[in-house]
Image (cartoon, rainbow, N blue to C red):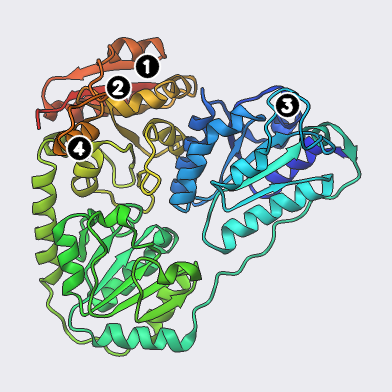
Amino acid sequence: MMTGGEVLVRSLAAHGVETVFGIPGTHNLEVYRHLTAFAIRHVTPRHEQGAGYAADGYARTTGRPGVVVTTTGPAVLNAAAAVGQAYSDSVPMLVVAPGPPVRHPQRGTGMLHEMRDQRGALAAVTGTAHRATSHAEISEAVAQAFGEMAGQRPRPVYLEVPLDLLAEKADVSIVDPIPVSPREPDRELVAEAARRLAEAHRPGLLLGGGVKAAAAHARELAEALRAPVLATTNGKGILPEDHPLWVGAALHLRAASSFVEDCDVLMAVGTELASTDWWHGTPRPEYLIRVDNDPGQLVVNARPQLAIAADAGRALDSIQAALPPVPTRDGDRAATWRSRHRQEAREEGARWVPTLDALASVLDRDAVVAADNAMACYYGALGNLPVHTPGGFCFPTGYGTLGYAVPAALGAAIANPRRQVVALVGDGGLMFSVQELATVAAERISLPVVVFVNGGYGEIRAQMRQAGIAPAGVDLPVPDFVALAQSLGGRGVVVELPGDVGHEVRAAFERPGPTLVIVDEPAA
């Protein structure tokens, strides 16, 4: 005999959940009753959106689903923006919240946190949104959620448990994890892909976030083909950026599009080929092969001549095994394209390059960078800050939220306590989630947060001027970030010279709590 709260927590523990992010409330207390007994660590961000971003950072850097626990109504809606970001970037996340009692009338009674359709609201930003109506169904739904996230394109899942079930007891058994086998590729399609790649004069690989778990397989195939490698924003770090076949990850640069157009055969793996990576339209090679675990994605944005629906690792392995002899190819081709990409990236990011170079000098090879939607990140860090490990660059592409970096860095640090984690954010975006510095301080996490200050929303200010619109709502007074950091349990320091950023970041790694490293951007 177990309450629904115990069924839920036992089920999470059975699926290897060790950490959840959330905020307790009146309706979810029966979940919290059991967390300690099942050795599940609870981290309390200061806002549910922060809980969602923290779970996102946890998931991106481990490959395991991040878990969020909220209470009803406004709490779960607070998390919805972060859930939408996870959906956009194919991040596995389980969001659990209580809902109205099983027999709650459809038209409502005015109870605390009541919503007309809480499950329906979350269905708009998740892959699956399910409301359990029995104790047995709670455990089944947890198993189904983890099975879905493991067996297909990972999307966030929402599970709603009626609050009366959380407290009531029933005789129920816990469902074991569902065995999931990776999707195998079609042998004939694999043979054709291998032949095309081997016979190509100018082959190339484009690696997206769907390849993070198969990074070693991608590297081996690239080396066997001697093919240069581009990556999407979410694929940054799949190939170490000092590898001789590396080209770059700033796909919006002309050099990236030119490389794709130069390829007589390009294989794109685990990527949507979306406009949020390319910005100016998806370029086309002479012959396009696409590999994706999501069959429906294979014809979106660019239709390939050859499409393979399969797990990335299985497909890459199978293609390498099927390769005929590969002819000798121009060994300087990757270096030539890398040089062009790097030159364009440094020209575009010139305002931030000195700061990013100083930061790079103190980061370990397995460091994690959590970046916000700030100009210094997508014009600067994306093309100019080397990352050498899969999942080492966490960035909210696609949905494009602000306030992501600090809570995502929190989640990444919780998941990877022995790795350096650093957050990059603008002064405008920082204010969306600055309260999470208090969470970082409470957890005694050594987290440097590099804040690029341009007095508000610099990108939108520039777009207004380009459109002939007098800037409005974009010029914001800059808070006293040093005092703000101190008030939240951290430290703040203003950097006078870009080169001093490395020293301050290194020092921040040596003391517990957050450190705001504040950098005034040079004028555009």
Neighbours of disc 2 within 10 Å: few (<14), some (14-19), many (20+): many
| Residue that label 2 marks | 516
- Disc nearest the viewer among 2 and 4: 4
Q: At x 40% / y 64%, what residue is drawn?
A: 270
Q: Residue at x 27, y 73 (%)?
A: 223
Q: Nearer the viewer, mark 3 or mark 1?
A: 3
Question: In the drawing, what numbered circle is on residue 463?
Answer: 4
Tell me the residue that label 1 is attached to: 490
Q: CA distance from mark 3 to mark 2?
A: 36 Å
Label 1 vs 2, first from the N-terminus: 1
The amino acid type of the residue labelled 2 equals: Leu
At a point 21% along the width and 80% down the height, the residue shown is 264
CA gap, disc 3 to disc 1?
32 Å
Give the x, y percent position of residue 39.
67, 35
> Separation of disc 1 and disc 2 at Cα?
8 Å
- As measured in the structure, the alpha-carbon distance from the residue carrying label 3 to the one carrying label 4 is 44 Å
